[in-house]
Image: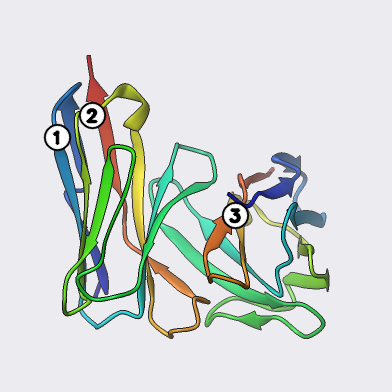
Amino acid sequence: SQELEQSPQSLIVQEGKNLTINCTSSKTLYGLYWYKQKYGEGLIFLMMLQKGGEEKSHEKITAKLDEKKQQSSLHITASQPSHAGIYLCGADRTGTASKLTFGTGTRLQVTL
Amino acid sequence: GAVVSQHPSRVICKSGTSVKIECRSLDFQATTMFWYRQFPKQSLMLMATSNEGSKATYEQGVEKDKFLINHASLTLSTLTVTSAHPEDSSFYICSAREIQNNEQFFGPGTRLTVL
């Protein structure tokens, strides 16, 4: 069974629209990482969340971790073509920020 | 943010040969680096944890004699795919953990194609 699920699997939004990507774990997490990947390229670090209820923002991207530390959401405001890519959440289950278990990813396309 | 480089970015080799991939943390020291593999349209799967000055820790199902890892310094880890076969063709990505704040930074990846 998939321990870390992302939804939706893919998303097509019009430029300027808001969107939300969710990441749900079957177990409580020590930390949750969000990355962005363009096809065939490495991962770009977006944000790391460690505390229940924590929320972080960077430019037009906001990530939240719920109080139970089992669910996280990534929200993009006023999407732009540069936001297109694959968004991956990674879970730290050990508390040592070592092994990360990744979700299946959400493929985002932004249309003009 | 911290930068991690990988070399080469792309490699094509014949079946049976060995290929070495380098992962470097450019502006920070990393006692721990990680090697992931990603097949097309799939997520990243951790292969092994590379520890500076000690043996790597491999995930279940990953052959340590086939995927040799060496972490000789605080800024360099290498992954050698020995006797490569077509099924080893994949996208290999390394990451390095920054000691101070536990953030993991990823390299740009190496696409390996074994003919």
Crowding around mark 1 (Cα neighbors within 10 Å: few <14, some 14 to 19, many 20+) is: some
Asked if residue A49 lies left or right of residue B70, the reply is left
Placement of the N terminus of chain A among the 4 image quadrants: bottom left
**Which residue carries the number 3 mark?**
B93
Q: Is residue A13 above or below residue A107?
A: above
> Dot 2 falls on which chain?
A
**Which residue carries the number 2 mark?**
A79
Asked if residue B107 lies left or right of residue A74, the reply is right
Q: Amino acid at mark 3?
A: Ile
Name the N-terminal-most of marks 1 and 2.
Answer: 1
Q: Amino acid at mark 2?
A: Ser
Crowding around mark 2 (Cα neighbors within 10 Å: few <14, some 14 to 19, many 20+) is: many
Placement of the C terminus of chain A among the 4 image quadrants: top left
Q: Secondary structure at mark 2?
A: loop
Disc 1 with disc 2 on a shared chain: yes
Crowding around mark 3 (Cα neighbors within 10 Å: few <14, some 14 to 19, many 20+) is: many
